Amino acid sequence: MHYNEDFVKSGIYNKGEIVLESIIKSVKANPKIKKVGSIHAFTGIVRDSSINGKPVARMKIDAYDELANKSIFEICERLKQEKGIMDVKIVHLKGEFELSEDLVYVVVASAHRKEGFDVISKAVDMYKKEIAVWKREDFNDGTSEWIH
Amino acid sequence: MIVEVLYFAEFKDITGKEKEKFEILDNNLEALLNILFEKYKLRSIIWDEKNQKIHSLISIIINNQAIHKKDPLLIDISDGDTIAFLLPVSGG
C-alpha cells in the first residue's frame, strides 16, 4: 500500500514501510481532532514463545492484500459508528520479522478514554478473526508452523 | 481456458510460488483441483475425503469474492478467473 505521510490509510503494508508515529500524526490531522480527548495505540509485536510455550526464533506474515484491505476498511468503518469514536486506523505489516519487531498497529481516537479503550480492544479481536493474514512461527528447533 | 491460482501461507510454502497459471478444459473447479493435486501435495489440506468435497475450513475465493459452495463440480469458473484457497486466518 502507498504511504502518504499526511494521510495514512488503514491496510496491509510491507515491514518497514510505516511507523506508529506516522499513524498517530495522521489521526491528529483529522478535522474532528478538536472533539478528541484521547488517542489509544496498540502495537502487536513478535513474542519469543508460541501459545503452547514453544520457543520462537522469528515470524513470517503473509497476506491476501485485496481481501485484507477490504476487511480492514470495513472494520474501521463499523467501529467509527460507535459512540464517541472519531477515528480508527488498523495497519498490519507483512514480511519476515525478528523477535520484538512490530507486526500490527491499531490507533483509536475517541472523545473520552473509556470508549477508546473499549473500541481498541474490539478492533484487535476483529482484525485477528476477520482479515486475510496468516502468521508462521519459526521455532528455535528449526521447525515452523502456520497458525490457524 | 486459462485461470490463475494465488497461493498464501502453507500453499506458498508447498508450491514455492506466489501464483501460477493453469490451462483447464472443463469450466468447473474440479478440473483445476485435479491438476493441483497431481502437481502438489495439497490434497490432504484442501480435500475432505470423508465427505468428498472441499474441506469446510477452506475458504474458496474467486476474483476476490468468497464462494460458499464446497462441491467443486458445482463451482463454475471462467477464462481469466483468479482463484485462491484460504485456510483460517491468524493476524499478528
Image (cartoon, coloured by chain):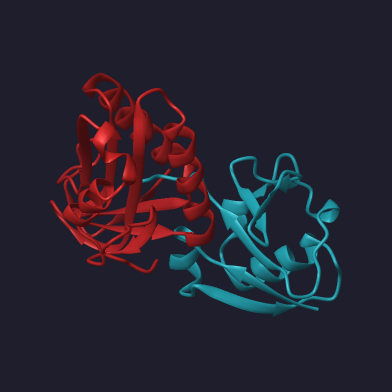
Chain colours: A red, B cyan
The quadrant in which residue A67 appears is bottom right
Q: Position of residue A141 (x, y in %)?
A: 19, 55
Q: Position of residue A91 (x, y in %)?
A: 33, 52
Question: Taking A148 as reference, is A87 left or right?
Answer: left
Q: Residue at x 42, y 52 (%)?
A: A133
Q: Residue at x 45, y 47 (%)?
A: A72
Depth check: give the residue in front, A137 or A61.
A61
Give above or below for A122 relative to A33. Answer: above
Question: Taking B26 as reference, is A63 left or right?
Answer: left
Depth check: give the residue in front, A109 or A72.
A109
The quadrant in which residue A54 appears is top left
The extreme top residue here reads: A114
Question: Taking B84 as reference, is A105 left or right?
Answer: left
The answer to whether residue A99 is seen in the rendering is: yes
The answer to whether residue A51 is seen in the rendering is: no
**The C terminus of chain A is located in which quarter?**
top left
Question: Taking A83 as reference, is A67 left or right?
Answer: right
The mark tally for this picture is: 0
Q: Residue at x 17, y 45 (%)?
A: A47
Depth check: give the residue in front, A144 or A97.
A97
Q: Position of residue A1 (x, y in %)?
A: 40, 66
Give above or below for B30 relative to A30. Answer: below
Q: Residue at x 21, y 44 (%)?
A: A43
The quadrant in which residue A94 appears is bottom left
Q: Position of residue B75 (x, y in %)?
A: 81, 55
